[in-house]
Image (cartoon, rainbow, N blue to C red):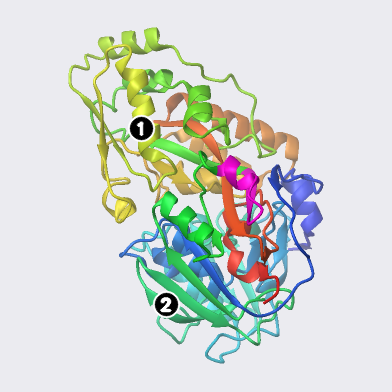
Amino acid sequence: MPIRRISRRALLSGALGIPLSTIIPGAVKAQGSNIRTRGGHLRVGLNAGSATDSLDPVRFYSSYQSIVGYSFANNLVEIGDTGELIPELAESWESDTNFMRWKFRLREDVTFHHGKSLSSEDVIYSLQRHMQPESGSGGQPYLRDVIEMRSDGPKEVIFLLRRPQVSFPYFLSDYHLLITPADLSPDAGVGTGAYLTERFEPGVVWEGRRNTGYWKSDRANVDTVSLLVINESLARLAALRSGSVDVINQVDPGVAPALENDNTTQLVQSRGRSHVTFPMQMHVQPFANPQVRTALKLLFDRQAIVDQVYNGYGQIGNDHPISPADPFYSEIGQRSPDPDLALSLLRRAGVDQPIVLHASDIIPRGIQLAETFQAHATRIGVDLRVRRHPQDGYWSNVWAREPWCLALWSGRPTPEMMFSVAYASNASWNETGWESERFDFLLSEAGRESNADTRYEIFSEMQELVRDDCGTVIPVFLDWLDAARSRVRGLAPSIHDELLGKRVAEKVWLEGA
């Protein structure tokens, strides 16, 4: 069968419909010199760390773990700050004309931290672990259609898929699918990345030292890195202002304007795909009733949430996960608040018990968000109660366990990635238990379609299905708000994710180090 070689340009502007000229919506206050320097100790204060964290990529589930993972390991493919595909451990890739057979060629100059040369054996070992039914990995959906992986020599890996998937290289950029050596335990914290693991204390800190043989000549600029767990947003800000840390993520929107006018700090605002969800488990009453789900969606005053809870640092959502920053975002009718209809639907559904919403500030301003929604409900006589939870252990003890809770998603580089991990009927992180044969069929059709216009039509219908039928409320897309001391250089907006696509450790440098 003939091989179809697909350039990054073709994948971006042709097969996927993402223009190469995509502009990153965001802002950064320029300071200092952009001449790259080496040396120094980088300290990053981060949220979402937990005592249950692991260095095994199969067990990653939080932003903290993914930032740690990208500090010591690499993917086959990287997503750039404008959403473009960048070769990483794979120097090139190609597919057949049906997008069902993919070949990836590995770099020749890469070794793991313990001296082993990167080989196809390591790639197959790393990825097969996610494919095990019992793995529970968030990366499993991206490999579900792989029916065979095999070596074609030590530096080439062939993937055979059961159905076409034009976005398959994007799938391999997921933060779970990091490559670790086949001859070591997967939780050893050993990879091919910019920093070698020196210390890991779950829920407290990860520390690394520079990989002096790192194959990316323009990365790994600092000598040592500390990724510190500081879950409370005000504590992170205090650490930044005192000089205890150099960089923080998820700046509180209420204090962000003050940082913009502070000469000792820089605020980086990125308008991307991050969104808050209110997933209802659809097999549990009262959420099994579609009238209840619709009523709760109609109670949200989305613009008030953007303005009052997030101080304008965001965009209103429409109960589907594809953001206005995505080229496949569909202009379907925006859901508006209708409290009278919401109350009528709840009465028809016979809801006579309090509705409980579980929340935590592990979601930015999560408690305030939940209480704002509670106020919307109380105004029309709906008994909605907010149950507050600590940040530590929220993802393992509350999310996807309680019938209704808050969640935070970073979004994904392509719609089919987002839909595959959280909305397909068999998705491992399907947080509502929603099942739709039509949706699953369209997801399959999107994988075989390389025409951007047709893909847009497919994704538009999928967004509408999620909005109208799925048991989640998505009221807001959040701007990523990162901040740093003025001596930190290289920090810039990214459409892909916070902190330079979570690769802050390998990308920034310290002025005057």
Residue depicted at 48% across the width and 46% down the height = 409
Give the SS element for disc 1: helix
Q: Amino acid at mark 2?
A: Pro
Instruction: In the rendered view, tell whether residue 77 sits above or below residue 105.
Output: above
Residue found farthest to the left: 353
Whether residue 273 is visible, yes or no, is no
Whether residue 473 is visible, yes or no, is yes
Q: Nearer the viewer, residue 152 or 227?
A: 227
Q: Amino acid at mark 1?
A: Ala
Residue 261 in magenta stretch = yes
Residue assigned mark 2: 186
Q: Nearer the viewer, residue 227 or 326?
A: 227
Q: Tell which circle, 1 or 2, labels the residue nearer the N-terminal end.
A: 2
> Badge 2: how crowded within 10 Å, few (<14), some, or many (20+)?
many
Locate residue 39: give its quadrant.
Answer: bottom right
Label drawn at residue 370: 1
Looking at the image, residue 263 sits to the left or right of residue 248; the answer is: right
Residue depicted at 66% across the width and 67% down the height = 508
